Image (cartoon, rainbow, N blue to C red):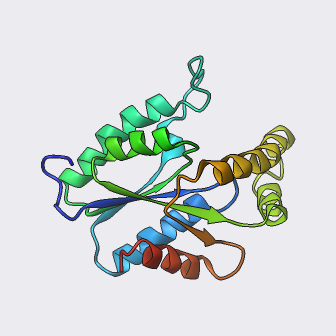
Amino acid sequence: MHADSPRDARALLINGTVGVGKTTIAEAVGALLADAGVPHAVLDLDWLSNSWPTPPGDRFNFDLLLRNLRSIAGHYLDAGATRLVLAGVIEKQDERKALADAVGVDLTVCRLRAELPLIQQRLTYRHNCTTKALQWHLNRSGELDGILDRASVDDFTIDTSTGSVTDVALSVIRAARWQ
């Protein structure tokens, strides 16, 4: 735990394949926490690893993400945040442990799920003008979904196929026992 962080501080990683709604749900969880007066921060982990080129052996720049997260999480916790809501992907147990070590507080992992045809529809909408990016994401969605099925790094799973964004975010908060 970070030295100056509140004793009840906790983190939640919203995990899942591309296009499942990680960032959207993380933002909605943050909005619900704000409405409830809970000090928090919402972080999209993709931005903490976004640099090029990636080093050999670190395809998604996970090491850079961890270094950046260690610093940023500490700043939010030192400023009084009691909840850290993270949107990102972990594929292995050792990545879960490294992420937990980087945030320095208890980490719960929620996996968002949806049927691949729905995810592919979302991706097509999101990447409608960039064919190369769309094809990469369509291929990665199925690949990553299978990897996450085998990895079992999550504490619980929430379906994003039905219900409003707010309903899904409420389900995440309840399953994490943050309410």
Q: Say above or below: 152 vs 62.
A: below
Q: Say above or below: 112 vs 55.
A: below
Nearer-the-camera pick, 80 or 10: 10
Q: Where is residue 85 in the image (x, y as percent from the top left)?
A: 41, 60
Total numbered labels placed on residues in the image: 0
Q: Say above or below: 45 vs 37.
A: above
Residue in the picture at 85% in, 63% down: 117
Nearer-the-camera pick, 92 or 129: 92
* Residue 140 left/right relative to 152: right
Instruction: Locate the C terminus by quadrant.
Output: bottom left
Residue in the picture at 17% in, 60% down: 6
Splitting the image into 4 quarters, where does residue 19 fall?
A: bottom right
* Residue 147 left/right relative to 15: right
Residue in the picture at 44% in, 79% down: 174
Residue in the picture at 55% in, 80% down: 166
Q: Where is residue 9 in the image (x, y as percent from the top left)?
A: 25, 61
* Residue 91 left/right relative to 131: left
Q: Say above or below: 80 vs 130.
A: below
Question: Which residue is situated farthest in the top direction here?
Answer: 56
Residue 17 seen in the figure: no
Question: Which residue is situated farthest in the left direction here?
Answer: 4
Q: Where is residue 114 in the image (x, y as percent from the top left)?
A: 72, 67
Q: Position of residue 136 (x, y in %)?
A: 79, 40
Residue 62 seen in the figure: yes
